[in-house]
Amino acid sequence: MQYEPIFLKPMQNHEVLSDLLSNIVTDLVVLPELALSGYVFQNQEEVDSVAESIPDGEIFKDFQALSAKKDMSIVYGFAERALDNYYNSAALINPDGSYAIYRKIQLFYREKLFFSPGDRPYFVSTAKSEVKIGMMICFDWQFPEAARSLALQGAQIITHPSNLVLPWCQEAMRTRSLENHVFSITSNRIGTEQNGNFSHTFTGQSQILGTKGEILIRMNDTETGIYTVEIDAALANDKSITEFNNAFQDRRPDMYKLI
Ligand code: ACM
């Protein structure tokens, strides 16, 4: 799913998103990072004005109802308030009412002024039809450990809400998918957002990738909408490369220096 949110207008954005989502039939849909609020914050008050707590947030509860009604899992990015902290988070909501919250671990640029870095390691959740979902957000793409951690824990699909501004992610994600033999869904936003002296232009090109890094769908950098593809998530369980090679069994962690 790709669109341009209106900055600091979560209720208006929620209405647009709800309309778009009511018209589709799918098992899983992925929305952008900070999908309800926009991105270019100038101060903490702006973040506070759009942040929601879980599970009491109004929009979160509305998405829970929509997920049940439409019988689809929903992943979306939002500003989370938790006690005195704010996180750039993603929620997975399932039709049975279960949910999981991922708090962005690798904060980008001025996000560091307004959000705390995620305080829980990468984890895998179960979505509709027992599909294994790993969540990461936007700039997490830069760190191969993120996708690897999710894949090693059994993720079949990496869901990747994004507000991308650098030009490399969409191609880099082909490698993330290929090296881990997982599907990935990057939902990016579009448009230029200006707030005072700060401005970002977002790169669109939301995409769904197969387990060999092949592009199953890639949108352009201006269109709004939702595309679906049908996949067999179980293909991600097969990590074989040749009859002698396996992407996971051939790993040599004792030879790696990661800390
Ligand atoms: C980003 O992490 N939103 C670039």
Image (tube, rainbow, N blue to C red):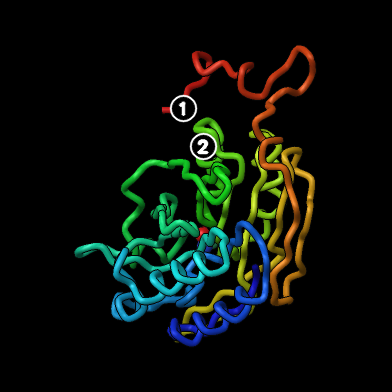
Give the vertical position of 131 relative to 114 (above or below): above
Most extreme residue toward the left, as rendered? 83
Q: Nearer the viewer, residue 100 or 181?
A: 100
First-in-chain label (1 vs 2): 2
Q: Is residue 230 left or right of residue 43?
A: right
Residue 60 on image: x %, y %: 40, 69
Q: Is residue 47 left or right of residue 153?
A: left
Give the vertical position of 60 relative to 138 (above or below): below
Which of the labelled discs sits on residue 258, or is there none? 1
Residue 188 on image: x %, y %: 62, 65
Quadrant of the rendering where the N terminus is positioned: bottom right
Give the vertical position of 94 relative to 148 (above or below): below
**At 46% across and 59% down in the image, what residue appears?**
93
The kind of residue on which mark 2 rests is Glu
**At 76% across and 23% down in the image, what residue appears?**
241
Instruction: Provide the residue designation for mark 2.
Output: 145
The kind of residue on which mark 1 rests is Leu
